[in-house]
Image: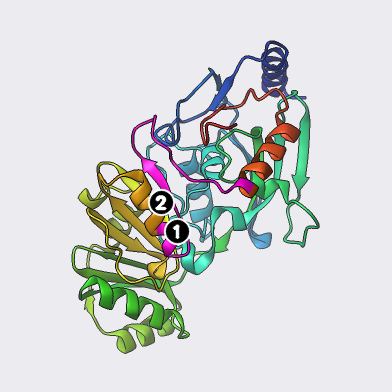
Amino acid sequence: MDLLVQQYAERIRAAAASKSPLRIRAGGTKDFYGHALAGDVLDVSGWQGVVEYEPTELVITARAGTPLAQIEGTLAQRGQMLACEPPHFGASATLGGCVAAGFSGPRRAAAGSVRDFVLGTRVMNGQGEELRFGGTVMKNVAGFDVSRLMAGSFGTLGLLLEVSLKVLPRPDQEATLRFAMNEAKAIEIMNRWAGHPLPISATCFTDGALTVRVSGSRLAVKAACDKLGGDPVADSADFWHSIREQTLPAFQGRLWRLSIKSTTPPLNLPGRQVIEWNGGLRWLATDAPAEQVFEAARRAGGHATLFRGARDEPIMRLEPGVLALHRKLKAALDPQGIFGPRRLAPEF
């Protein structure tokens, strides 16, 4: 066992024996999310490095503390990318934080989420035991795919040591178009275009304009631009970066993330909105009461999460069955409850 991994195991076993909470942390760029950050910090930022990269197989395996920028730079040298376009939210973002948070960027509706690209993980559970799940190939899995359960767990189920990810080739060409229209029209047209064989890789409505990115071969991009029309966007890379990293004014303040049916008409909620993923993702900056937002998302066939806000507010509403499942998973992987207690819900 590597020296650092051995130190992590000893630290975890000691914490489990004394039932002392630990907070797994590397770059810390996702610290804003969730309830209280409880426990002593288990710093894993030193556990870095690409373990294996097979460009011809479209698979990369790296240690969890590896900077996300380094991963993306390595892939870019071979004309490849993390297709889910994960946000960094800071220069110190790491691969482990990317997977543990499970956040996906503008390309998610077209390419898939972080979870969809996780092939395998090397994990340390709440007893200091090293476990491996999945592998380095796409395959069907019977029962729980534990590797993918780690995506979005925020370090509450175990310590990620290594991750194997499926990667994709970068598109030959991309173009971004902008259309002036109201919110209702944007929702209707995004859903209509989603039903056609168009190489749309991202959509975003904000401030009275729908922005659309098309990606693919030179001929496919040209054909799509000719069909869609709109005004070309010169600073397209900067725009999509501002959406991915949430630097636009519309993202500032108390921010909610609503995952709902894409065809849902404009929500009758106060505040500023940014709409992505063909209408399926609505960002809402508002001071509206939490129950009002939760209820609006429920009526729209989805759910709401407080993405940025006060630590003492409820960040999500879990149904009894889902809560029971979370508790069983927590008990199986972290029986003493030492990893990030109550970060995602007060109940565990």
Q: Are marks 2 and 1 in contact (CB under 8 Å)?
A: yes
Q: Quadrant of the N terminus?
A: top right
Q: Identify which amino acid the numbered label 1 is placed on.
A: Arg
| Residue 315 lies in quadrant | top left
341 falls in the magenta region: no
Question: Within the image, what quadrant is residue 227 found in?
Answer: bottom left
Q: Quadrant of the C terminus?
A: top right
Q: Residue at x 48, y 85 (%)?
A: 197
For the residue pair 169 and 143, the one nearer the viewer reads as 143
Name the amino acid type tagged 2. Answer: Phe
Q: Is residue 18 above or below residue 340?
A: above
Location of residue 177 in the rendering, given as x and y in whole percent from the top left corner: 27, 74
Q: Secondary structure at mark 1?
A: helix
| Frontmost residue, 183 versus 74 | 183
Q: Is residue 309 magenta?
A: yes
The residue drawn where x is 68% and y is 10% is 18
SS label for mark 2? helix
Decide if residue 280 is in sight here.
yes
In the picture, measured across the screen, residue 316 lies left or right of residue 100, that is left
Q: Can you identify the residue that label 2 sits on?
A: 294
Residue 125, position as x, y percentages in the image: 72, 30
Q: Which residues are magenta?
A: 297-320
Report the disc number at residue 298. 1
Residue 339 at x, y = what percent? Answer: 61, 26
- On the image, the x and y values in percent for residue 53 come to 65, 50
